[in-house]
Amino acid sequence: MERIKDALIIRLIEQISEHYRSNISNRFLRPILLQIQIDKSTWDQIEELTEKMEINRYQGFHMDELYLQIAACARFIEAARSQMIPSLKTKLGGLPNSQDKILREMAANNFDSNLKVFSDLLNQLFLNLTEMDKAVSGSKPPVYSTLQELYSINRLLAGH
């Protein structure tokens, strides 16, 4: 399979990566994120998309791997909505007071909306990938139609 080097796709992945590192997995929220009950392979795929994009930027991205990384992020979003959001302020409030208390409270107060932005960016990436996938698949079925992990992607990203 040919590697994706499309500028729009790469830019979206950069946005996703930056948003995740700054607003989802920042120093205030990371300790609580790690308490979310998802498997190691899901964490690995999230890390591959959000932390290791430099390698793929130059070599190109594999479409099937990107789809699986999007699905992993969608599972993370679903888990964060159910396991983290309801008790986030309580968990962060239980951490020792520090000079960063206001920043920690801001991270907690904005987590839900930042998770929504993350979800929206992932959905945009997914839509762009499926369009590219359809265009390059020719007479073969597009890659996304062969990956069972993607069947519930819209529900997971939308939160329904």
Image (cartoon, rainbow, N blue to C red):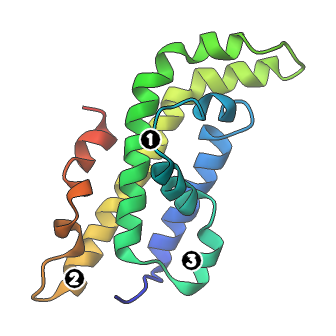
Residue at screen point 38% across, 89% down: 2
Q: Secondary structure at mark 3?
A: helix
Of helix, strand and loop, which one carries label 1? helix
Q: Quadrant of the C terminus?
A: top left
Report whether residue 125 is seen: no
**Disc on res. 42:** none
Question: Residue type at mark 2?
Answer: Ala
Foreground: disc 2 or disc 1: 1
Residue under pointer 2: 135
Which residue: 47% across, 32% down? 37
Check the image and name the residue furthest to the left: 139
Viewer-proximal residue among 72 and 133 = 72
Q: Which percent across, then down, holds residue 31?
A: 68, 31
Residue 96 lies, in percent from the top left, at 82, 14
* Quadrant of the drawing holding the N terminus: bottom left
Please tell me which residue lies in front, 61 or 14.
Answer: 61
The residue at 23%/67% (across/down) is 144
Residue at label 1?
76
Disc 3 marks a residue whose amino acid type is Asn
In the rendered image, is residue 154 in sight?
yes
Question: How far is mark 2 from mark 1, CA to CA?
Answer: 29 Å
Q: Residue furthest front?
A: 40
Eye-nearest disc, 3 or 2 = 3
Question: Would you say the residues marked 3 and 2 are in contact, meaning their CB atoms lie under 8 Å apart?
Answer: no
Give the vertical position of 95 relative to 150 (above or below): above
Placement of 98 over or under 66, stated as above or below:
above
Q: Position of residue 23 (x, y in %)?
A: 63, 39
Q: Position of residue 43 (x, y in %)?
A: 52, 49
Residue at figure coordinates x 45%, y 23% from the top left: 83
Which residue was labeled with disc 3? Answer: 56
Q: Quadrant of residue 88?
A: top right
